[in-house]
Amino acid sequence: MTLQLERPVTTTEMQRFKAIDEAFPDLHAEMIDGEVCIETVVTSAHGQMVMSIGAQMPAQWCVMTEVNTVYEGWHGATYLRPDLSVADPSYRGTNHEEFPADEVILVGEVVSKSNPENDTRRKVTKYAQAGIPYYLVVDPTKGQCLLYSLPSEGRYRSKVESKFGDPVSVGAPLDTEIDTSALYTY
């Protein structure tokens, strides 16, 4: 895999987003279809669940948190920072400001209380459009995980639901099983 460092189309929306993002560096900001979404508080519980999932990824893979993810097909109007991203091992130790979505194998989001539809609805479409093979939604409000896979024509063709405590199987090339017994509701 090779990292493409070309930047997405510079748009008015992207310029506005970058200005807001730079003005408030301690907040978690993303942009979906030109709408800036800011999470004001990332709770300890949220972070613990992200770390629990990330720690279970096979050691050889490049596991990243809140990496700036871009995709040319989003036309510069969407800029996502998944809670967790997994990429090819060749990216371990790299430090890129923006990471192309087509180089990501799995993204994971822990659903926020303040705006759950971003993670459970809007991002499902965006990650499928980008062709990311796996999208894991960890939903502490419902005590379940959703694993989306098989992206095609802007949507995922498969969705597997698992209750917290049940394992989540991720296929090739990761070929791993995620233990969800440490996850909890809030």
Image: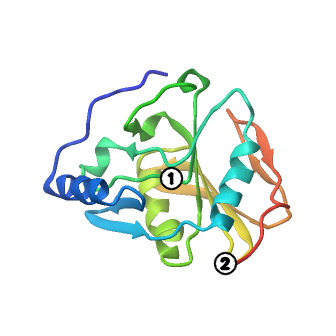
Is 37 on the left or on the right of 182, as rendered?
left
125 relative to 66, above or below: below
The foreground one among 138 and 175 is 138
Which image quadrant for residue 112?
Answer: bottom right
Name the mark on residue 82: 1
Q: Secondary structure at mark 1?
A: loop
Q: CA distance from mark 2 to mark 1?
A: 18 Å
Q: Residue at x 65, y 65 (%)?
A: 44
The foreground one among 36 and 43 is 43
Three-letter residue code for mark 1: Pro
Q: Which residue is mark 2?
A: 141
Which image quadrant for residue 49?
Answer: bottom right
159 relative to 10, above or below: below
**Marks 2 and 1, the one that precedes in the sequence:** 1
Task: Give percent across and percent down for residue 186.
Answer: 70, 78
Q: Residue at x 77, y 43 (%)?
A: 56
